[in-house]
Image: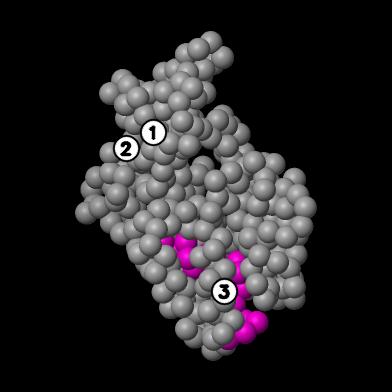
Amino acid sequence: MGILNHVVLGVMVMLCNGIGVKGELNVGFYSQTCPNAESIVMSVVKDATASNSRILPILLRLHFHDCFVEGCDGSILIDDGENIEKGAFGHEGVKGFDEIELAKTKLEVECPGVVSCADIVAMAARDAVFLSGGPHYQVETGRRDGRVSKASLAADMPDVNDSIDALKSKFMNKGLPPKDLVLLTAGAHTIGTTACFFMPVRLYNFTGKDDTDPSINPQLLPKLKRRCPINGDVNLRIPLDPVTSEAFDDQVIRNIKNGFAVIASDARLYDDDATKETIESYLKFASQLDGSFFGTVFPEAMVRMGQIGVKTGSNGEIRRVCHSFN
């Protein structure tokens, strides 16, 4: 049975059994204690979008970075103390902290001491997907905030220049199989941009011999080199999806197959039998549907990611402010 068939036929089993530590998460966790929690977070994300069009992919990325270090526990939000997680190299360029803090401030007025910062991050990511034109999926809540934030714990974050074996290993260590590596990559990179800072190795020194990644489509290569010239401005930003950069869709999966992946880690997903089979199976199945398939399988992967290492019950705390431990 193909890997994607497991997505379609086995998803209910996976959702019931969970991946990682699901704990006591459930949809509507705050329905009695803070019934307006989700609408308050959504209003903050909407307002932020009006003043910063880039905030949606930023909030989506923030959830990923939070979950991959110490689980989905808001540890990336801490900004007081030395050698905190936020300052790790693997979190370079991660933003969205002010929006999460603003949502927390509003929630503390509505229902003090109830909603965790970790849950705010998860809800804001879902809202970012929806406001980008993606699906509105149900977010499990009930996470508590972690009490540890160390840069050293972020040493194993997935990196743009990782090999496919390294990427698979890092995801598997979090309980996420190769198909989730493909789906989460495609969803996270369908909107937003990357900096030229992450491009020199792929464009100019791929094997250490002043060469270029041969997987780059010849039509895309000159465009990338024009935007990110050698010794150019490393802060210049380019779309992660050069084909439909403004749409939340499955184009990144197609880009990977056709050589139009922008960053190296995306391209590597076609170098491995398991991830390549996921891509091929997905495209075959999606071609038979009306375009809504990605809107089903991507949220399922997001829910599974949101279960990584969660703290529930008496574990952790509910912070009064998101940037500081109680």
Q: Residue at x 73, y 60 (%)?
A: 80
Q: Earlier in the sequence, mark 2 or mark 1?
A: 2
Image location of residue 161, percent across then percent down: 55, 30
Q: Mark 2, residues whose alpha carbon is within 10 Å: few (<14), some, or many (≥20)?
A: many
Q: Mark 3, residues whose alpha carbon is within 10 Å: few (<14), some, or many (≥20)?
A: many
Query: What's the magenta region?
Result: 111-129
Q: Earlier in the sequence, mark 3 or mark 2?
A: 3
Q: Residue at x 47, y 13 (%)?
A: 211
User: Mark 2 and mark 1: span between their CA atoms?
Assistant: 8 Å
**Which amino acid does the dot numbered 2 rest on?**
Pro
Q: Is 122 contained in the magenta span?
A: yes
**Which amino acid does the dot numbered 3 rest on?**
Lys
- Relative to 60, say whether 41 is above or below: below
Q: Which numbered marker is on residue 104? A: 3
> What residue did someone put label 2 on?
242
Callout 2 secondary element: loop
**Which amino acid does the dot numbered 1 rest on?**
Ala
| Magenta span dominant secondary structure | helix
Q: Who is closer to the viewer here, 9 or 114?
A: 114
Q: Residue at x 65, y 52 (%)?
A: 86
Q: Residue at x 47, y 83 (%)?
A: 36
For marks 2 and 1, give the one nearer the viewer: 2
Do the residues under discs 3 and 1 have CB atoms within 8 angstroms?
no
Q: Which numbered marker is on residue 119? A: none
Callout 3 secondary element: helix
Image location of residue 209, percent across then percent down: 53, 10
Do the residues under discs 2 and 1 have CB atoms within 8 angstroms?
no
- Relative to 1, say whether 49 is above or below: below
- Assign the C terminus to one quadrant of the image: bottom right
Q: Who is closer to the viewer here, 28 or 240?
A: 240
Left or right: residue 182 compared with residue 226: right
> What residue did someone put label 1 on?
261
